[in-house]
Image: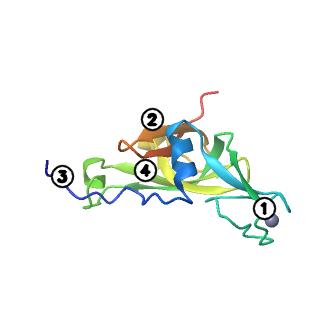
Amino acid sequence: MASSPRFDLPTIESETRPFWEAAKNGKLLLGKCNSCELVHYYPRPMCPKCWSEDVSLVPASGRGEIYTYSTVYVNDLPPFNARLPYVAAQVDLEEGVRITTNIVECEIADLEIGMPVELRFQAISEDVTIPVFAPRRS
Ligand SMILES: [Zn+2]
């Protein structure tokens, strides 16, 4: 079956496989340094602050707030062109990290900087589920 090229799928490698497996199971993993306790995102094999290699993966609470956002009306690349308009955003998680993501389940006119949001997951292929955020209801 012929299919259009896709520009939204990550290349999953051995280092990133645990992150993507967890996302499929409804968990967003952050990196945490066991030496200086800094939480970082995206998860890295080495702490970005103290360079310790003693890092773990920890699940995010899923609560955060919108730091900034932009409504995307034009994007020619598939499959984004079929999703227009969509909201690209940066969300500050309560763990202190900022994640680039999409906001879903929200009218564009209702979006606000600082809006409390909570984690959702969207399966975008058989192998890939991505973290997205929706207005917080709890
Ligand atoms: Zn550290």
Q: Quadrant of the C terminus?
A: top right
Q: Amino acid at mark 2?
A: Glu
Q: Kindly tell me whether mark 2's CB lies below 8 Å from ligand 1.
A: no
- Structural distance between the alpha carbons of marks 2 and 4: 10 Å
Q: Amino acid at mark 1?
A: Asp
Who's the residue at 47% across and 46% down the image? 130
Q: Amino acid at mark 3?
A: Ser
Split into quadrants, the picture shows ligand 1 in the one at bottom right
- Structural distance between the alpha carbons of marks 3 and 1: 42 Å
Of mark 3 and mark 1, the one earlier in the sequence is 3
Q: Quadrant of residue 34?
A: bottom right
Who's the residue at 61% across and 59% down the image? 42
Give the SS element for disc 1: loop
- Structural distance between the alpha carbons of marks 3 and 2: 28 Å
Instruction: Give 94 or 57, whichever is nearer the viewer.
Output: 57
Who's the residue at 30% across and 49% down the image? 84
Give the SS element for disc 3: loop
The numbered disc on residue 87 is 4
Give the number of the mark in front: 4 or 3. 3
Give the SS element for disc 4: strand
- Structural distance between the alpha carbons of marks 4 and 3: 25 Å
Is 75 displayed left or right of 28 in the figure?
left
Of mark 4 and mark 3, the one earlier in the sequence is 3
Q: Which residue is mark 3?
A: 3
Do the CB atoms of the residues marked 4 and 3 lie less than 8 Å apart? no
Of mark 2 and mark 4, the one earlier in the sequence is 4
Instruction: Give 50 or 98, whichever is nearer the viewer.
Output: 50
Q: Which residue is mark 1?
A: 54
How busy is the neighbourhood of tag 2: few (under 14 within 10 Å), some, or many (20 plus)? few
How busy is the neighbourhood of tag 4: few (under 14 within 10 Å), some, or many (20 plus)? many
The numbered disc on residue 105 is 2
Of mark 3 and mark 2, the one earlier in the sequence is 3
